Image: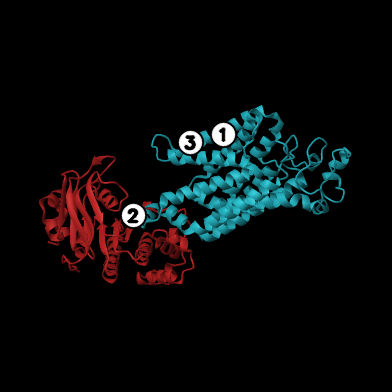
Amino acid sequence: MPEVTAAPSASGAFDFDALLAPGLPAPNVPAPAASISAPVSHPAAPAAAQETQPAWHDFASSWSLYRDPILCGVVAGAVLGVLGVFVVLRRAVFVTAAVSQSAALGVALAFLLGIYLGFTPPPVLCAFALALASTGVLAWRQRSATLPREAIVGLLYVGASALAVLVGDRIAQEAEDITAILFGTAVLVRPEDFLAVLTVSGVVGLSVALLYRGLVFAGFDPEGARVHGLPVAWLELALWVLVALEVSVTTRAIGALPVFAFSVLPAMAALLVVKRLGHAVLLAGLLGALSAGLGYLAAFFFRFPVGAAEACVGATFFLIAAVVARLRPSV
Amino acid sequence: MAADTSPVRPELFECRSLRVGIAGRALLPPFDLTIRAGEFWAVVGRNGAGKTTWLRTLLGLLPPIAGKVRSAVDVRVSYLPQRSGMDDLYPLSAREVVSIGAERGWSFLGGVGARGRQDKVEQALAEVGAAELAERPFRRLSEGQKQRVLFARLAAADAEVAILDEPTSAMDKVAEKEAFELISTLRDTHGLAVLVVSHYLSIVSQFADRAILLDSDSQQVVSGAPREVFAHPAFRARYGDFVEEATGA
């Protein structure tokens, strides 16, 4: 794995200094033209200076550095927020968690194969394969009466998370990468991952728009939809393939924790406060994008881990929505 | 209210030696039945008699245990399941329920903007007296209002056959009678064939021109004119004191 994708500190907190640390390859972003002030300066800067609170002008002066990761998070948050409405309405929120952990395992396995076979398959493809496989297992087990789907979701989540950590233990060189993928500590994003997120998110967003009415009818009244000749099983498959696709690509770029957060929290908040499904979809997309953008800013200014900060902003939106919903007549 | 049941009416469904059941276990004996355009069928039977199982088999939602169900080519069917079939988590307005529920096949790919479709939705809502409910959240409507909206969906979907599984189970008798009058009007206006499950025998007998009694306990299926079915010993054995209600005697 020749490139660095993240610059987490030991705690996973936003650590711009590490980006410019000696011994690490240069990140795939243009270097800021001007020198960077204290909080985002070279690690050799005096410790006291490093503790200084970052300011807006620090952020503005390094915008070229943060632009791509912020846009990547915003696009991922928006599309995951939209998908999340359908996931939440199908009472399957932890499916996304299991799928994102499976995607993370896929990335870890790609690195492992690179070490032991000398050939590294594209991590995003491995992520998608594992995400799709876990989706397939869930769809298959849904027909079983012996165990509820939640049990299989739990198994996949725990199994994929534990395996990703075990695999990470065998690829010490990429250990930081695995941490970044699991917990979303990545500060930067590779250009190829950014491109993949933009492309896949565009395809997924358009697909959801195209299938919207079918997805709603099939979810609201599945038997009525079947009687009307709608391809209900195909629509369900399409939804979960779209989820697997978006989750696998965005997990590689921004990490499993924020991916799970974006696919659940904005949708929950939106469904609490609006009366129309179409409005909920739009609001969830907006809140997902805002969670990513504001979360990144919070991580920058308060030196938090990026993924956790983004998830906390999403949770804050949900709390605000819950208060608003309590104060308004029921919807 | 009896409709013309002359044989010239096209056949929409034909059950031949049909056995229905669940998980490979037959509930009823084999029976033959033909449902024609414009007929109003009352489906009666005690709880667990096999009514819903038969309807779901007719709709293709359950496979037959034996025999066949044949349907006319491209017949347009609408199904109003018991209330539990719809998910109240979805924040849909009454208009959206009618509009989205009117989709057929792959028509959902056509988007929301089709002018003709919107006009049809508005017309259907007005036809069932639910125009004033259009903007209200479907999940906040009373059961009677919800049924009205679902009847509008049925009208907007250009259905040829309406299959209603206890559509009035949550209504009082007055509301149920109003609902049946509405169904009957839709039948007359749209030339619908109607199959409706109901336990209100006196009301059913006013509107239906055909009836079918399903009884898994005695393994009998009786069909024909309502008067004939309600006079059948199997019906009398099952309904006892309620025979008078059904026959109006």
Position of the N terminus of chain B, as image quadrant, is bottom left
**A318 and A150: which one is in front?**
A150
Q: For the residues carrying marks 3 and 2, which lies nearer the camera in this image? A: 3
Q: Amino acid at mark 3?
A: Ile
Q: What residue would you read off at disc 2?
A: B81
Dot 3 and dot 1 within a common chain = yes
Q: Amino acid at mark 2?
A: Pro
Asked whether the viewer can see residue A217, the reply is yes
Crowd tier of the residue under label 1, counting other residues whose Cα lies within 10 Å: few below 14, some 14–19, many 20 or above = many
Chain A: drawing colour: cyan
**Residue B51 on image: x %, y %:** 25, 50
Please identify the quarter of the rendering in which residue B104 is found: bottom left
Q: Colour of chain B?
A: red
Label 3 – label 1 distance at C-alpha:
12 Å
| Labels 3 & 2 near each other (Cβ < 8 A) | no
Reading the image, the residue beneath label 1 is A160
* Rendering quarter of residue B158: bottom left
Can I make out residue A323 in this image? no
Q: Position of residue A27 (x, y in %)?
A: 76, 43
Measure the alpha-carbon separation of dots 3 and 2.
Answer: 30 Å
Residue A152, disc: 3
Q: Nearer the viewer, mark 1 or mark 2?
A: 1
Disc with the residue nearer the chain's start (3 vs 1): 3
- Decide: few, some or many residues near mark 3? Use Cα within 10 Å; few <14, some 14-19, many ≥20: some
Q: How is the image coloured?
A: by chain
Q: Position of residue A30 (x, y in %)?
A: 79, 49
Q: Position of residue A167 (x, y in %)?
A: 62, 29
Q: Could you tell me which residue is drawn at 35 percent across and 69 percent down?
A: B128
- SS for callout 2: loop
